[in-house]
């Protein structure tokens, strides 16, 4: 986050604000003043020192990682948010690859920071969402001096080698406190690379029991049954047309719901934000290394278009869905549906309506942030025309599209539904137009990009594809809309890489043994066979064509579908937790790249598909309440 301050003395993006120890420069991060000819694409924002990636120009994390590399010779691992640095336990010596201990000290610790310690701010106030980090360059009994980046865009005065001086004081017990000068912002403390852990915070892992989801049952209501989903609302009417006045298809589960602890919720939010950042980091890596793109079965003719989409539209992703297993064993990711994810309405609306109707006061609705976070994501997307909402003639896609249309409307964006492609045609000037002759220039879709890619493969195989000539002799296909050079599709074309299951082995190669990831490989390995494994089509959807094998290669569960001809990847078998005969999967949603809500999908089968049911998910107000509820249930 950048602190709002007077613009009188601000300098443009990339200009030096000051020089810290070791000759490490702090640069202006005024993104509003970026010269887009010099910074033509996303790769231009990546910064390296002697081949070591330091971060995104010119974020606070980039500066401190560069400072540590130049002055200390070590760096810390990729993190999603600046405040996550407080949880790190090691830094890595670049020359020896050795891990060195990193210890955290709360603001008010008996252990003072040292020059080279990192000062960490919690998320909130001016540092909302991300937190902030700076390098402590000097420590005294009454102040600390810090060097930083992405705080403001004002040069450091008087040729000094630090950006700010913060007041410090001692408590009667000898504790050391650093005062924050920013309203509604909070200093967490500092981290120091040291072998001496005296007075350091013990960053113990949370009680595993807190990660268990609890299935609970409301007492049967004595009030007469009534419609609790409002048919006067178009999206709710479409939902009822498919599902009826219920969330779960089986009446036996009418009053059943799940409860998640606060500790689990915090971990889920952190994982969602961090994994989104890692997936984007991996997407960039793949697009810079074309040999990796060979794994994705994406027609080569599209590779330049995908790179262009990534360079120009990196920040135009609205939403995606992560699928997790959450239990006392931990939190593990199955996959990221970054393109045409579903269940937004169930998460953001229906489970909340269920809670209101049932007067459920056991915690809060886990999907309550989603609607307004989506609205904010649309507002930040800078759509400047009519959005054609393109969907198949499918009941589920219908209510999903109508729900998303309501978020667009709230954001002030005009939209129009288009069912199928039958009524589309070509205009004289080469645009695809709808039945009313309106050119399709902005698209939000429930269709997967893979549908358009399959059409493209057919045309390439038949030698019919042309990049310039407009095929006026035939009706437009989906690929003609999505791949039209003047059409802006959401989610953007680059998400065809991010959503592809081929990303899972690449992530495992880039971040081996990452706590949220499962071992994934392009080939079946002895390690996977030893513990059991899953076969997944790289561009599959809806849980189709997935096979689960145990360690004896015996099939545990299998789904059929349309993706049997796709290449597959192999992932560690990590069964879902099971309650009362139901396998339970946690789904979290992103909006604008950040956590925006969660829901639960259930099935008697070990594989969750588009036919699987949902149960309402609630978040306990505190771990104490969660434990008490768990005992009382």
Image (spheres, helix red, strand yellow):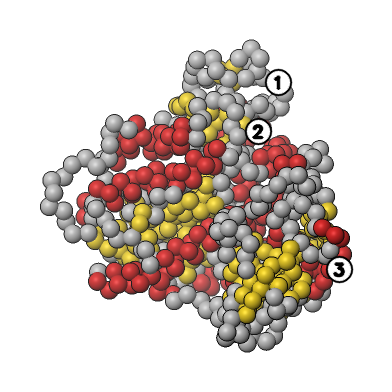
- Label 2 or label 1, whichever comes before in sequence order: 2
- Mark 2 or mark 1, whichever is nearer to me: 1
From the top left corner, tell me how far across and down residue 477 is, in percent.
Answer: 56, 26
In this rendering, would 253 be left or right of 398?
left
Residue 458: quadrant of the picture: top right
How would you rate the neighbour count of disc 2 (Cα within 10 Å): few for under 14, some for 14-19, many for 20 or more?
few
- Label 3 or label 2, whichever comes before in sequence order: 3
In this rendering, would 309 be left or right of 343?
right
Residue 397: quadrant of the picture: top left
- Label 1 or label 3, whichever comes before in sequence order: 3
For mark 3, what is the residue? 22
Above or below, 595 against 551 in this view is above
The numbered dot on residue 461 is 2
From the top left corner, tell me how far across and down residue 175 is, in percent.
Answer: 60, 82
Judged from the image, the secondary structure of the residue bearing numbered disc 3 is helix
Toward the viewer: 294 or 620?
Answer: 620
Toward the viewer: 33 or 457?
Answer: 33
Q: Residue sitting at 70 percent across and 26 percent down? A: 466
Judged from the image, the secondary structure of the residue bearing numbered disc 2 is helix
Res. 495 visible in picture: yes
The numbered dot on residue 469 is 1
Res. 105 visible in picture: no
Q: Residue sitting at 29 percent across and 31 percent down? A: 232
How would you rate the neighbour count of disc 3 (Cα within 10 Å): few for under 14, some for 14-19, many for 20 or more?
few
Q: Residue sitting at 63 percent across and 47 percent down? A: 497
Residue 462: quadrant of the picture: top right
Spatial separation of the CA atoms under disc 3 and disc 2:
58 Å
How would you rate the neighbour count of disc 1 (Cα within 10 Å): few for under 14, some for 14-19, many for 20 or more?
few
Q: Residue sitting at 53 percent across and 73 percent down? A: 530
């Amino acid at each position: 986050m950048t602190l709002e301050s007077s613009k009188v003395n601000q300098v443009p993006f990339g200009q030096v604000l000051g020089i810290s120890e070791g000759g490490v420069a702090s640069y202006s991060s005024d993104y509003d003043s970026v010269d887009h000819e010099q910074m033509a694409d996303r790769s231009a924002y990546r910064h390296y020192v002697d081949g070591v990636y330091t971060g995104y120009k010119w974020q606070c994390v980039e500066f401190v990682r560069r400072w540590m590399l130049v002055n200390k010779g070590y760096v810390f691992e990729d993190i999603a948010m600046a405040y996550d640095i407080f949880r790190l336990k090691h830094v890595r010596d670049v020359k020896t690859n050795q891990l060195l201990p990193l210890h955290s000290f709360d603001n008010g610790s008996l252990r003072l920071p040292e020059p080279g310690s990192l000062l960490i701010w919690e998320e909130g106030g001016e540092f909302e969402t991300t937190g902030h980090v700076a390098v402590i360059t000097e420590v005294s009994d009454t102040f600390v001096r810090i060097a930083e980046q992405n705080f403001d865009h004002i040069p450091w005065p008087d040729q000094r080698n630090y950006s700010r001086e913060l007041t410090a004081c001692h408590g009667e017990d000898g504790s050391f406190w650093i005062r924050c000068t920013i309203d509604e912002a909070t200093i967490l403390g500092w981290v120091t690379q040291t072998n001496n852990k005296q007075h350091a915070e013990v960053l113990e892992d949370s009680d595993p029991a807190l990660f268990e989801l609890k299935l609970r049952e409301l007492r049967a209501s004595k009030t007469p049954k009534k419609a609790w989903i409002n048919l006067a609302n178009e999206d709710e009417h479409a939902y009822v047309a498919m599902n009826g006045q219920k969330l779960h298809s089986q009446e036996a589960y009418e009053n059943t719901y799940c409860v998640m602890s606060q500790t689990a919720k915090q971990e889920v939010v952190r994982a969602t934000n961090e994994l989104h950042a890692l997936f984007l980091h991996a997407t960039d890596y793949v697009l810079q290394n074309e040999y990796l793109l060979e794994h994705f079965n994406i027609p080569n003719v599209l590779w330049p278009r995908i790179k262009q989409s990534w360079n120009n539209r990196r920040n135009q992703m609205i939403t995606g869905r992560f699928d997790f297993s959450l239990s006392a064993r931990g939190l593990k990711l199955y996959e990221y549906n970054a393109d045409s994810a579903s269940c937004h309405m169930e998460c953001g609306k229906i489970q909340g309506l269920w809670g209101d109707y049932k007067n459920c006061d056991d915690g809060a609705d886990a999907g309550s942030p989603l609607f307004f976070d989506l609205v904010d994501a649309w507002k930040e997307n800078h759509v400047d025309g009519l959005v054609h909402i393109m969907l198949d003639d499918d009941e589920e896609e219908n209510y999903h599209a109508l729900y998303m249309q309501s978020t667009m409307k709230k954001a002030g964006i005009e939209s129009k539904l288009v069912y199928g492609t039958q009524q589309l045609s070509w205009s004289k000037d080469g645009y695809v137009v709808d039945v009313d002759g309106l050119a399709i220039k902005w698209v939000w879709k429930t269709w997967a990009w893979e549908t358009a890619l399959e059409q493209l493969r057919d045309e390439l195989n038949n030698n019919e594809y042309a990049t310039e000539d407009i095929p006026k002799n035939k009706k437009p296909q989906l690929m003609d809309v999505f791949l039209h050079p003047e059409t802006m599709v959401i989610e953007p074309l680059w998400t065809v890489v991010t959503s592809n299951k081929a990303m899972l082995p690449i992530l495992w190669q880039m971040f081996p043994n990452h706590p949220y990831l499962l071992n994934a490989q392009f080939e079946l390995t002895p390690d996977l066979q030893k513990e059991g494994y899953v076969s997944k089509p790289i561009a599959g959807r809806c849980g189709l064509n997935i096979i689960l094998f145990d360690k004896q290669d015996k099939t545990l569960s299998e789904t059929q579908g349309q993706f049997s001809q796709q290449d597959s990847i192999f992932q560690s078998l990590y069964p879902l937790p099971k309650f009362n005969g139901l396998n339970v999967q946690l789904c979290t949603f992103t909006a604008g790249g950040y956590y925006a809500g969660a829901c639960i999908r259930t099935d008697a089968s070990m594989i969750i598909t588009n036919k699987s049911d949902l149960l309402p998910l609630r978040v306990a107000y505190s771990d104490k309440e969660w434990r008490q509820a768990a005992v009382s249930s």
